[in-house]
Image (spheres, grey):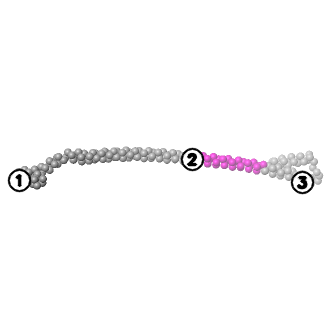
């Protein structure tokens, strides 16, 4: 068949649609392109266009999801900061309350210790007074005995009850006035 086409093309000098060397090559190129354009559009460009559109839609959805996640993360971060601030405030309140309770307890302990020390001091003073009174009584008894002994030696006789009472009364009166 190829030799027949070659014969036909060499026979005449006019327009030869099979001869691709001249203007007819351009014509056939345009005809083939236009004839192939519709199947190419349907089989190649359509799927590619749909894939690109689907990819663009997926990219827009991913961007929207990322923006939403970013805004949610920002809101969560802000909420965490607020809660952290509240927790710090609450912790400061607890520390202040604990410090106040400790200071109050310290005051109570100091006051109790002071009261106990005052009680101990009062008890010691009372014990000292009691011992002092005992000592004074004992000294007075000794003085009375010595006085009787001295009176017996000075008078040279035993002093009776009546004399003892008078001497003791005088002695107590004079000792009470000096004390």
Q: Residue at x 8, y 51 (%)?
A: 16
Percent across and percent down for residue 152 are 92, 52
Q: Residue at x 89, y 51 (%)?
A: 148
Indicate which disc, 3 or 1, sits on the residue closer to the N terminus.
1
Which dot, 2 or 1, sits closer to the camera?
Answer: 1
Dot 2 corresponds to which residue?
Answer: 98
Residue 11, numbered circle: 1
Dot 3 corresponds to which residue?
Answer: 150
Let me know if residue 124 is in the magenta part. Answer: yes
Percent across and percent down for residue 12 are 5, 52
Q: CA distance from mark 3 to mark 1?
A: 192 Å
Indicate which disc, 2 or 3, sits on the residue closer to the N terminus.
2
Left-right relation of 4 to 97: left
Residue bounds of the magenta highlight: 103-130
Outermost right residue: 157
Q: Residue at x 32, y 47 (%)?
A: 59
Which dot, 3 or 1, sits closer to the camera?
Answer: 1
């Amino acid at each position: 068949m190829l030799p027949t086409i070659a014969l036909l093309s060499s026979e005449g000098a006019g327009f030869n649609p099979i001869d691709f060397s001249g203007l007819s090559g351009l014509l056939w190129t345009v005809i083939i392109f236009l004839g192939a354009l519709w199947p190419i559009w349907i089989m190649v460009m359509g799927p590619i266009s749909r894939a690109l559109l689907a990819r663009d839609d997926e990219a827009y959805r991913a961007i929207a999801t990322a923006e939403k996640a970013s805004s949610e993360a920002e809101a969560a971060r802000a909420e965490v900061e607020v809660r952290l601030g509240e927790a710090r405030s609450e912790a400061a309140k607890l520390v202040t309350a604990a410090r106040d309770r400790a200071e109050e307890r310290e005051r109570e302990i100091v006051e109790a210790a002071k009261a106990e020390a005052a009680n101990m001091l009062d008890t010691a003073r009372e014990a000292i007074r009691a011992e002092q009174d005992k000592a004074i009584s004992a000294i007075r008894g000794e003085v009375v005995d010595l006085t009787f002994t001295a009176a017996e030696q000075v008078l040279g006789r035993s002093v009776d009850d009546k004399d003892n009472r008078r001497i003791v009364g005088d002695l107590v009166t004079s000792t009470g006035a000096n004390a």
